[in-house]
Amino acid sequence: MLTRPRRLRTSPIIRELIAETRLSANMFIYPYFVTKGKNKTEAIEAMPGISRFSIDQLIPDVEKGLKAGVNKILLFGVGEEKSEDAHSAHDAHSVVADAVRELKKKFGKDLFIVTDVCLCAYTTHGHCGLASPPAPLQRRGEEILYIDNDLSLPILARMALAHAQAGADMVAPSDMMDGRVAAIRNLLDESGFVNTPIMSYSTKFASAYYGPFREAADSAPGKGDRKSYQMDFRNGREALREAQLDEDEGADIVMVKPALAYLDVIKTVRESTLLPVACYNVSAEYSMVKAAAKAGYIDEQRITMENMYAFARAGADIIISYHTREILEKGWM
Protein backbone atom coordinates (compact mmCIF):
# COMPACT_ATOMS: atom_id res chain seq x y z
CA MET A 1 0.00 0.00 0.00
CA LEU A 2 1.15 3.57 -0.78
CA THR A 3 -0.74 5.37 1.97
CA ARG A 4 2.27 6.36 4.11
CA PRO A 5 3.87 8.88 1.68
CA ARG A 6 0.44 10.35 1.00
CA ARG A 7 -0.18 10.91 4.72
CA LEU A 8 3.16 12.68 5.03
CA ARG A 9 2.16 15.11 2.30
CA THR A 10 -1.14 16.19 3.86
CA SER A 11 0.37 18.59 6.42
CA PRO A 12 2.39 21.67 5.37
CA ILE A 13 4.44 21.35 8.57
CA ILE A 14 5.37 17.76 7.81
CA ARG A 15 6.15 18.64 4.17
CA GLU A 16 8.66 21.19 5.43
CA LEU A 17 10.02 18.69 7.95
CA ILE A 18 10.78 16.02 5.34
CA ALA A 19 11.85 18.27 2.44
CA GLU A 20 14.90 16.72 0.80
CA THR A 21 16.29 19.97 -0.63
CA ARG A 22 16.71 23.14 1.39
CA LEU A 23 17.88 26.64 0.59
CA SER A 24 19.78 29.05 2.80
CA ALA A 25 20.55 32.74 2.40
CA ASN A 26 24.20 31.76 2.82
CA MET A 27 24.11 29.95 -0.54
CA PHE A 28 23.48 33.08 -2.63
CA ILE A 29 25.83 35.52 -4.35
CA TYR A 30 24.48 38.67 -5.99
CA PRO A 31 26.21 40.07 -9.12
CA TYR A 32 26.90 43.79 -9.51
CA PHE A 33 28.08 45.86 -12.47
CA VAL A 34 30.34 48.75 -11.44
CA THR A 35 31.26 51.49 -13.90
CA LYS A 36 33.58 54.46 -14.14
CA GLY A 37 32.40 57.93 -13.18
CA LYS A 38 30.26 59.47 -10.45
CA ASN A 39 26.55 59.73 -9.67
CA LYS A 40 25.71 56.97 -12.15
CA THR A 41 22.88 54.51 -11.78
CA GLU A 42 22.18 53.17 -15.25
CA ALA A 43 19.22 50.80 -15.64
CA ILE A 44 19.97 47.83 -17.90
CA GLU A 45 17.04 47.58 -20.28
CA ALA A 46 17.51 43.88 -21.01
CA MET A 47 17.67 43.01 -17.29
CA PRO A 48 14.73 44.61 -15.45
CA GLY A 49 15.67 45.63 -11.93
CA ILE A 50 19.44 45.45 -12.56
CA SER A 51 21.65 48.53 -13.00
CA ARG A 52 25.21 49.64 -13.54
CA PHE A 53 26.52 51.72 -10.62
CA SER A 54 29.41 54.10 -10.21
CA ILE A 55 31.26 53.40 -6.97
CA ASP A 56 29.61 56.25 -5.04
CA GLN A 57 26.16 54.86 -5.95
CA LEU A 58 27.19 51.23 -5.48
CA ILE A 59 27.98 51.70 -1.80
CA PRO A 60 24.46 52.74 -0.66
CA ASP A 61 22.87 50.03 -2.80
CA VAL A 62 25.12 47.39 -1.25
CA GLU A 63 24.28 48.78 2.19
CA LYS A 64 20.58 48.38 1.45
CA GLY A 65 21.14 44.80 0.37
CA LEU A 66 23.19 44.00 3.47
CA LYS A 67 20.21 44.89 5.64
CA ALA A 68 18.27 42.11 3.87
CA GLY A 69 21.12 39.60 4.21
CA VAL A 70 22.79 40.06 0.81
CA ASN A 71 26.33 39.81 2.16
CA LYS A 72 28.12 38.13 -0.75
CA ILE A 73 28.54 39.93 -4.08
CA LEU A 74 30.28 39.34 -7.42
CA LEU A 75 31.74 42.41 -9.14
CA PHE A 76 32.03 43.01 -12.89
CA GLY A 77 33.84 46.07 -14.24
CA VAL A 78 32.36 48.25 -16.99
CA GLY A 79 33.59 51.30 -18.84
CA GLU A 80 37.34 50.78 -18.66
CA GLU A 81 39.69 51.64 -21.52
CA LYS A 82 39.71 48.88 -24.13
CA SER A 83 43.04 47.91 -25.70
CA GLU A 84 44.71 45.03 -27.51
CA ASP A 85 46.76 44.14 -24.43
CA ALA A 86 43.89 44.66 -21.93
CA HIS A 87 46.20 46.60 -19.62
CA SER A 88 43.31 48.31 -17.82
CA ALA A 89 42.15 44.91 -16.55
CA HIS A 90 45.08 44.68 -14.13
CA ASP A 91 45.51 48.36 -13.32
CA ALA A 92 45.84 48.91 -9.58
CA HIS A 93 43.10 51.52 -9.86
CA SER A 94 40.72 49.76 -12.20
CA VAL A 95 37.09 50.40 -11.37
CA VAL A 96 36.82 46.92 -9.80
CA ALA A 97 39.93 47.35 -7.64
CA ASP A 98 38.80 50.78 -6.49
CA ALA A 99 35.30 49.47 -5.79
CA VAL A 100 36.72 46.65 -3.66
CA ARG A 101 38.81 49.10 -1.63
CA GLU A 102 35.88 51.45 -1.02
CA LEU A 103 33.48 48.65 -0.14
CA LYS A 104 35.96 47.09 2.26
CA LYS A 105 36.60 50.48 3.85
CA LYS A 106 32.87 50.89 4.43
CA PHE A 107 31.74 47.37 5.30
CA GLY A 108 34.86 45.39 6.22
CA LYS A 109 34.26 41.72 6.98
CA ASP A 110 30.48 42.16 6.85
CA LEU A 111 30.68 41.98 3.04
CA PHE A 112 32.28 39.10 1.13
CA ILE A 113 33.50 40.29 -2.26
CA VAL A 114 34.16 38.05 -5.25
CA THR A 115 35.64 39.56 -8.41
CA ASP A 116 35.20 38.32 -11.96
CA VAL A 117 38.51 37.77 -13.78
CA CYS A 118 38.16 37.96 -17.55
CA LEU A 119 39.44 40.20 -20.34
CA CYS A 120 36.29 40.53 -22.48
CA ALA A 121 35.34 43.98 -21.14
CA TYR A 122 38.92 45.25 -21.49
CA THR A 123 39.93 44.17 -25.02
CA THR A 124 39.17 46.03 -28.24
CA HIS A 125 37.81 42.83 -29.81
CA GLY A 126 35.66 41.79 -26.84
CA HIS A 127 37.11 38.32 -26.43
CA CYS A 128 38.08 36.75 -23.13
CA GLY A 129 41.77 36.45 -23.96
CA LEU A 130 44.39 38.30 -25.99
CA ALA A 131 44.54 37.90 -29.75
CA SER A 132 47.54 36.28 -31.41
CA PRO A 133 49.67 38.84 -33.24
CA PRO A 134 49.25 39.70 -36.02
CA ALA A 135 45.47 39.87 -35.74
CA PRO A 136 43.10 39.54 -37.36
CA LEU A 137 44.35 36.93 -39.82
CA GLN A 138 42.75 36.49 -43.24
CA ARG A 139 41.17 33.27 -44.41
CA ARG A 140 39.03 33.01 -47.55
CA GLY A 141 38.40 36.74 -47.43
CA GLU A 142 37.01 36.53 -43.90
CA GLU A 143 38.62 38.19 -40.89
CA ILE A 144 39.54 35.51 -38.36
CA LEU A 145 40.58 36.39 -34.84
CA TYR A 146 42.68 33.80 -33.04
CA ILE A 147 42.78 33.96 -29.26
CA ASP A 148 46.20 33.14 -27.83
CA ASN A 149 45.63 31.00 -24.76
CA ASP A 150 49.14 31.12 -23.32
CA LEU A 151 49.64 34.84 -24.03
CA SER A 152 46.52 35.55 -21.99
CA LEU A 153 47.51 33.67 -18.83
CA PRO A 154 49.90 36.21 -17.24
CA ILE A 155 47.44 39.04 -17.90
CA LEU A 156 44.62 37.14 -16.21
CA ALA A 157 46.91 36.31 -13.28
CA ARG A 158 47.90 39.96 -12.89
CA MET A 159 44.23 40.95 -12.97
CA ALA A 160 43.43 38.49 -10.17
CA LEU A 161 46.40 39.74 -8.15
CA ALA A 162 45.30 43.38 -8.52
CA HIS A 163 41.88 42.42 -7.13
CA ALA A 164 43.42 40.48 -4.25
CA GLN A 165 45.72 43.39 -3.40
CA ALA A 166 42.69 45.68 -3.32
CA GLY A 167 41.05 43.38 -0.76
CA ALA A 168 38.90 40.92 -2.74
CA ASP A 169 37.92 37.89 -0.66
CA MET A 170 37.81 35.54 -3.64
CA VAL A 171 38.63 35.72 -7.36
CA ALA A 172 36.57 34.03 -10.06
CA PRO A 173 38.22 33.48 -13.47
CA SER A 174 35.55 33.21 -16.16
CA ASP A 175 37.69 33.37 -19.31
CA MET A 176 37.99 29.61 -19.95
CA MET A 177 41.65 29.78 -21.01
CA ASP A 178 43.41 26.47 -20.33
CA GLY A 179 45.83 26.72 -17.43
CA ARG A 180 44.57 30.00 -16.02
CA VAL A 181 43.73 28.58 -12.60
CA ALA A 182 47.31 27.39 -12.14
CA ALA A 183 48.67 30.71 -13.40
CA ILE A 184 46.48 32.65 -10.97
CA ARG A 185 47.19 30.32 -8.05
CA ASN A 186 50.93 30.51 -8.58
CA LEU A 187 51.02 34.31 -8.77
CA LEU A 188 48.72 34.74 -5.78
CA ASP A 189 50.85 32.37 -3.70
CA GLU A 190 54.12 34.01 -4.77
CA SER A 191 52.66 37.39 -3.80
CA GLY A 192 51.54 36.27 -0.33
CA PHE A 193 47.84 35.69 -1.08
CA VAL A 194 47.89 31.98 -0.28
CA ASN A 195 44.53 32.24 1.48
CA THR A 196 42.68 33.94 -1.38
CA PRO A 197 40.43 31.22 -2.85
CA ILE A 198 39.65 30.72 -6.53
CA MET A 199 36.11 30.01 -7.70
CA SER A 200 36.66 28.81 -11.23
CA TYR A 201 34.12 29.05 -14.02
CA SER A 202 35.34 25.57 -14.86
CA THR A 203 32.38 24.53 -17.00
CA LYS A 204 31.27 27.56 -18.97
CA PHE A 205 29.33 26.86 -22.14
CA ALA A 206 29.25 28.93 -25.33
CA SER A 207 25.64 29.84 -24.70
CA ALA A 208 22.95 32.11 -26.10
CA TYR A 209 21.80 32.67 -22.50
CA TYR A 210 24.43 35.40 -22.02
CA GLY A 211 22.81 37.95 -24.33
CA PRO A 212 21.53 40.47 -21.76
CA PHE A 213 24.79 40.28 -19.80
CA ARG A 214 26.80 41.36 -22.81
CA GLU A 215 24.69 44.50 -23.01
CA ALA A 216 25.19 45.07 -19.29
CA ALA A 217 28.96 44.62 -19.36
CA ASP A 218 29.62 45.95 -22.87
CA SER A 219 31.51 42.73 -23.55
CA ALA A 220 30.10 41.27 -26.76
CA PRO A 221 32.80 39.98 -29.13
CA GLY A 222 33.38 42.30 -32.07
CA LYS A 223 34.16 39.45 -34.45
CA GLY A 224 33.48 35.75 -34.36
CA ASP A 225 32.27 33.89 -31.29
CA ARG A 226 33.71 32.23 -28.21
CA LYS A 227 33.26 28.64 -29.25
CA SER A 228 37.00 28.03 -29.58
CA TYR A 229 37.51 28.39 -25.81
CA GLN A 230 34.07 28.09 -24.19
CA MET A 231 32.42 24.68 -24.07
CA ASP A 232 30.21 23.14 -26.74
CA PHE A 233 26.74 22.90 -25.22
CA ARG A 234 26.34 19.47 -26.80
CA ASN A 235 29.09 18.03 -24.60
CA GLY A 236 28.49 16.65 -21.13
CA ARG A 237 31.52 14.43 -20.54
CA GLU A 238 33.83 17.30 -21.40
CA ALA A 239 32.37 19.19 -18.44
CA LEU A 240 33.81 16.61 -16.08
CA ARG A 241 37.21 16.90 -17.71
CA GLU A 242 37.20 20.69 -17.46
CA ALA A 243 36.18 20.61 -13.80
CA GLN A 244 38.84 18.01 -13.00
CA LEU A 245 41.57 20.02 -14.74
CA ASP A 246 40.70 23.14 -12.75
CA GLU A 247 40.56 21.16 -9.52
CA ASP A 248 44.02 19.73 -10.26
CA GLU A 249 45.33 23.26 -10.90
CA GLY A 250 44.16 24.50 -7.51
CA ALA A 251 40.56 25.69 -7.85
CA ASP A 252 38.76 25.82 -4.51
CA ILE A 253 35.24 25.92 -6.00
CA VAL A 254 34.12 24.81 -9.46
CA MET A 255 31.21 26.36 -11.32
CA VAL A 256 28.71 25.42 -14.02
CA LYS A 257 27.40 28.25 -16.21
CA PRO A 258 24.61 28.64 -17.32
CA ALA A 259 22.47 26.77 -14.80
CA LEU A 260 18.87 26.25 -15.89
CA ALA A 261 19.51 24.32 -19.11
CA TYR A 262 22.46 22.49 -17.54
CA LEU A 263 21.02 20.81 -14.46
CA ASP A 264 22.34 17.48 -15.71
CA VAL A 265 25.85 18.94 -15.85
CA ILE A 266 25.55 20.37 -12.32
CA LYS A 267 24.56 16.90 -11.15
CA THR A 268 27.39 15.05 -12.89
CA VAL A 269 29.99 17.60 -11.75
CA ARG A 270 28.65 17.33 -8.20
CA GLU A 271 29.04 13.56 -8.32
CA SER A 272 32.59 13.76 -9.70
CA THR A 273 34.20 16.13 -7.17
CA LEU A 274 34.44 16.72 -3.45
CA LEU A 275 34.89 20.46 -4.02
CA PRO A 276 31.99 22.87 -3.50
CA VAL A 277 29.99 23.36 -6.72
CA ALA A 278 28.57 26.73 -7.78
CA CYS A 279 26.11 27.49 -10.55
CA TYR A 280 25.44 30.79 -12.30
CA ASN A 281 21.76 31.57 -12.97
CA VAL A 282 22.64 33.81 -15.92
CA SER A 283 21.16 36.95 -17.43
CA ALA A 284 18.76 35.47 -19.99
CA GLU A 285 17.47 32.94 -17.46
CA TYR A 286 16.69 35.89 -15.21
CA SER A 287 15.25 38.11 -17.95
CA MET A 288 12.99 35.39 -19.33
CA VAL A 289 11.36 35.00 -15.91
CA LYS A 290 10.96 38.78 -15.64
CA ALA A 291 9.43 39.07 -19.12
CA ALA A 292 7.01 36.19 -18.62
CA ALA A 293 5.94 37.52 -15.22
CA LYS A 294 5.36 41.00 -16.63
CA ALA A 295 3.17 39.51 -19.35
CA GLY A 296 1.16 37.67 -16.73
CA TYR A 297 2.12 34.21 -17.98
CA ILE A 298 3.71 33.01 -14.74
CA ASP A 299 3.84 33.63 -11.01
CA GLU A 300 7.30 35.19 -10.62
CA GLN A 301 7.91 34.15 -7.03
CA ARG A 302 6.86 30.54 -7.57
CA ILE A 303 8.85 30.11 -10.79
CA THR A 304 11.93 31.78 -9.32
CA MET A 305 11.95 29.61 -6.24
CA GLU A 306 11.25 26.45 -8.24
CA ASN A 307 14.35 27.26 -10.28
CA MET A 308 16.45 27.86 -7.15
CA TYR A 309 15.39 24.56 -5.64
CA ALA A 310 16.17 22.83 -8.94
CA PHE A 311 19.73 24.17 -8.81
CA ALA A 312 20.16 22.98 -5.24
CA ARG A 313 18.52 19.62 -5.95
CA ALA A 314 20.93 19.07 -8.85
CA GLY A 315 23.81 19.58 -6.43
CA ALA A 316 24.75 23.26 -6.37
CA ASP A 317 26.16 24.44 -3.04
CA ILE A 318 26.38 28.06 -4.22
CA ILE A 319 23.90 29.93 -6.42
CA ILE A 320 24.90 33.13 -8.22
CA SER A 321 21.68 34.84 -9.26
CA TYR A 322 20.27 38.25 -10.17
CA HIS A 323 17.15 37.16 -8.27
CA THR A 324 19.08 37.15 -4.98
CA ARG A 325 18.02 40.60 -3.79
CA GLU A 326 14.32 39.94 -4.34
CA ILE A 327 14.50 36.48 -2.79
CA LEU A 328 16.04 37.83 0.42
CA GLU A 329 14.37 41.24 0.59
CA LYS A 330 10.89 39.83 -0.04
CA GLY A 331 11.35 36.73 2.10
CA TRP A 332 10.58 34.28 -0.69
CA MET A 333 12.38 31.36 0.95
Image (cartoon, rainbow, N blue to C red):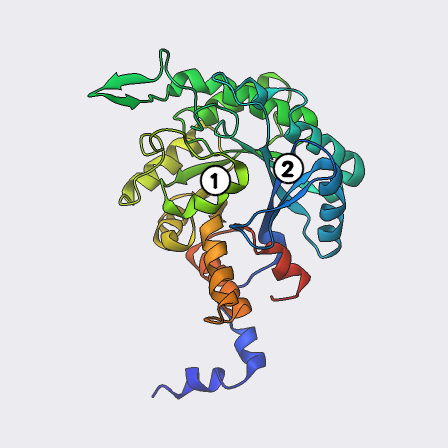
Q: Residue at x 65, y 38 (%)?
A: 113
Q: Position of residue 172 (x, y in %)?
A: 53, 34
Of callouts 1 and 2, which one flags the residue occurring earlier in the amino acid sequence?
2
Q: Is residue 31 visible?
A: yes
Q: Residue at x 61, y 25 (%)?
A: 194
Task: State the SS at label 1.
Answer: helix
**Which residue position holds label 2?**
34
Specify the farthest residue to the right.
106
Three-letter code, disc 2:
Val
Q: Quadrant of the C terminus?
A: bottom right
- Give the CA distance from mark 1 to mark 2: 14 Å
Q: Residue at x 60, y 50 (%)?
A: 50
- The residue nearer to you, when weighing 95 against 160, is 95
Left-right relation of 215 to 189: left
Q: Which mark is residue 305?
A: none
Q: Position of residue 230 (x, y in %)?
A: 36, 35
- Dot 2 crowding, Cα within 10 Å, few <14, some 14–19, many 20+: many
Left-right relation of 40 to 123: right
**Which residue position holds label 1?**
214
Three-letter code, disc 1:
Arg
Residue 92 drawn above or below residue 171:
above
